[in-house]
């Protein structure tokens, strides 16, 4: 039976689209729901067009009460009976209370070659450090931010003249290759790191 995947997005959702588009045919998983904290996330409209269930839980009414925000997400997820969560540009930090029950079953994509550049502004930081290569990482989510066992990485060279935007655009192309490839393997039980 197909694994049931929930995909969490906050923005454009291009990684979500890459994942959904790959989950066809003999793929061992299917998208069961797309979750967002932002009703205006581009990814939400696209998911609805595809006939995928969506759950929007705006974080703002919860102020800084992350636990109550996360409890609301947890309750919304129950009917979907998920096997795997993929964070795909979900820009809210999840606490240990949410992460712990999903440990080993929740993936994240991050736009750097972890363990370098956890957090934000990864492309600018790679440039500022004078790195000759950069890339993206898919990892299992643990309570520590952008930490956890690495499931795959894709590398690209930093070109002379690169600025954060050009680097981000080339890394994003790699994200769209890496995340589907990792999820496909992960859903069939393969956790050895993939290098692209
Ligand atoms: C992607 O570059 C993803 O790696 C990044 O946000 C972007 C979302 O784009 N995630 C993080 O920075 C998480 N720390 P998308 O909405 O088009 O997939």
Image: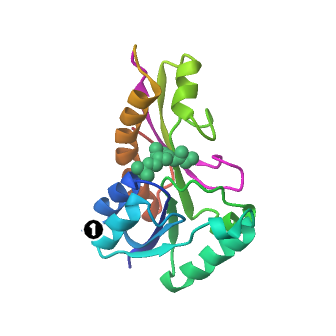
- Comparing 142 with 194, the one in front is 142
Classify residue 146 as left or right of residue 136. right
Tell me if residue 61 comes above or below residue 128 in the rendering: below
Where is the C terminus found, in terms of image quarters?
Answer: top left
Classify residue 127 as left or right of residue 33. right
Q: Residues within 10 Å of mark 1 (few under 14, many from 20)?
A: few
The residue that appears at 46% across and 59% down in the rendered structure is 186
Horizontal and vertical percent for residue 99? 67, 64
State the colouring used for the structure image: rainbow
Identify the residue under disc 1.
26
Residue 143 drawn in magenta: yes
Q: How many marks?
A: 1
The residue that appears at 54% across and 65% down in the rendered structure is 37
Report the residue that reaches farthest toward the top.
160
The residue that appears at 56% across and 80% down in the rendered structure is 76
Tell me if residue 77 comes above or below residue 123 in the rendering: below
* Occupied quadrant, residue 48: bottom left
Horizontal and vertical percent for residue 171? 41, 36
Report the residue that reaches farthest toward the left.
25
Horizontal and vertical percent for residue 22? 30, 59
Asked which secondary structure carries label 1, the reply is loop
Tell me if residue 110 comes above or below residue 115 in the rendering: below
Tell me if residue 22 comes above or below residue 26 in the rendering: above
Write the start and end of the magenta stretch as one range: 138-159
Horizontal and vertical percent for residue 128? 57, 19
- Comparing 182 with 67, the one in front is 67
Classify residue 48 as left or right of residue 10. left
Where is the N terminus found, in terms of image quarters?
Answer: bottom left
């Amino acid at each position: 039976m197909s694994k049931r995947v929930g995909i969490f997005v906050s923005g454009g959702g291009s990684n979500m689209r890459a994942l959904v588009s790959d989950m066809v045919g003999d793929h061992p998983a299917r998208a069961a729901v797309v979750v967002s904290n932002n009703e205006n996330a581009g990814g939400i409209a696209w998911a609805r067009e595809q006939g995928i269930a969506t759950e929007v839980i705006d974080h703002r009414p919860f102020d800084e009460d992350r636990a109550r925000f996360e409890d609301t997400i947890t309750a919304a997820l129950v009917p979907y009976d998920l096997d795997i969560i993929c964070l795909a540009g979900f820009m809210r930090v999840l606490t240990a209370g949410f992460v712990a029950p999903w440990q080993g079953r929740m993936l994240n994509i991050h736009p750097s070659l972890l363990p370098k550049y956890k957090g934000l502004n990864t492309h600018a930081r790679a440039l500022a450090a004078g790195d000759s290569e950069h890339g993206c990482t898919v990892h299992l989510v643990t309570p520590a931010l952008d930490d956890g066992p690495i499931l795959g990485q894709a590398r690209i060279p930093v070109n002379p003249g690169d600025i954060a935007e050009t680097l981000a655009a080339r890394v994003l192309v790699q994200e769209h290759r890496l995340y589907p490839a990792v999820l496909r393997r992960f859903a069939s039980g393969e956790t050895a790191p993939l290098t692209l």
